[in-house]
Amino acid sequence: MSSVEGAVRAARRAVVFTGAGISQESGIGTFRGPGGLWERFRPEEVATPEAFAARPELVARWYAERFAAMRAAVPNPGHRAIASWEALFPSLVVVTQNIDRLHQRAGSRDVLELHGTLWVSRCARCRREVATESLPPAEPPPARCDCGGMFRPGVVWFGEALPLDVFARAEAEVAAADLFVAVGTSATVWPAAGLIELAAASGALLVEVNRDETPMSRLAALTRRGAAGEELPRLGEEWGRWRSPS
Ligand code: OAD
């Protein structure tokens, strides 16, 4: 039996760490690389508190378009495979950088959203949170709160801190994990990418599923180079065989 097989057979706590690449096959664009969002838009013009303060209408329209695309998207076989792994391991936590909620829609029950979600909007003044879908259309956007403040997307912008409680739980889960699977992330945005080093330092078996090489690749004990929607169901089949009582 290979050391990878032995570690997967013995694993009790799994963490799946995901980035934009897992939703690519659901039709949601990634940030980096050819055709990526950050090739067409500058993050500082749409994804910072300063941009929202200076041009709220433009930022609100940009996110409204992205939210419409996410709402229309459906989970792909990669999301569904991860949800099905809850049956394989006693504990399975998804730690995602994505804001699209496709993991939850695929059935994953324990999802930590490091960068927030577009499905929630928050008043920039009184911090009240509402479901984005419940906001009445405003012309010009953004919609206004009863307090007079503007609703902003419930996501983490550049220059903002990650939600402390969410990140603290992610760190604790990663530190306790014996299996850590990173999927579709360029592993370049901090502090999220630091979870990979933490997993390595804590002795977890590191698996990477990505179309391309990343800074994480050198740490991974097992690498699957390909589309998440194809590779994850395949891994799941193999791991299911390894973990079913023989
Ligand atoms: P990136 O766009 O940086 O990276 C996506 C990764 O997925 C790349 O390594 C691609 O090679 C890979 N990839 C693309 N399609 C794939 C597929 N079908 N199957 C497998 N791999 C695929 O996205 P993130 O790493 O998520 O933050 O980016 C991290 C953060 O940067 C985002 O959360 C966002 C962004 O700026 C904020 O907005 C705060």
Image (cartoon, helix red, strand yellow):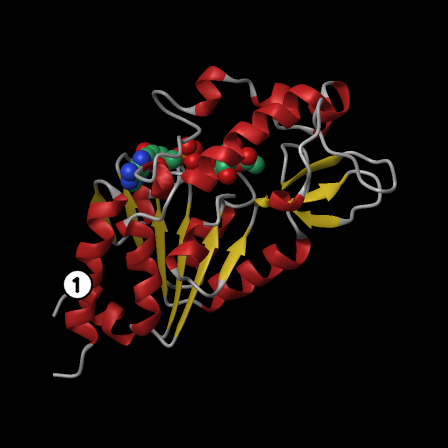
Question: In the image, what residue occupies the spot 36% across and 50% down?
Answer: 182
Quadrant of the displayed image that contains ligand 1: top left
Rendering quarter of residue 204: bottom left
Question: Residue most toward the bottom?
Answer: 246
Say if residue 188 shows up in the picture: no
Rendering quarter of residue 154: top right
Question: Residue most toward the right?
Answer: 147
Q: Position of residue 218 (x, y in %)?
A: 30, 43
**Side (left or right) of 166 relative to 22:** right
Which residue matches tag 1? 237
Q: Position of residue 216 (x, y in %)?
A: 36, 43
Question: In the image, what residue occupies the spot 55% across and 65% down?
Answer: 172
Which is nearer the eye, 11 or 215?
11
**Side (left or right) of 109 relative to 122:** left
Q: Position of residue 90 (x, y in %)?
A: 37, 77
Question: In the image, what residue occupies the spot 52% across and 43% down?
Answer: 99
In the rendered image, which quarter contains the C terminus?
A: bottom left
Q: Amino acid at mark 1?
A: Glu
1 w.r.t. 68: above or below: below
In the rendered image, which quarter contains the N terminus?
A: bottom left
Q: Position of residue 87 (x, y in %)?
A: 31, 73
Which is nearer the eye, 61 or 82?
61
58 w.r.t. 191: above or below: above
Count of marks overlaid on the render: 1
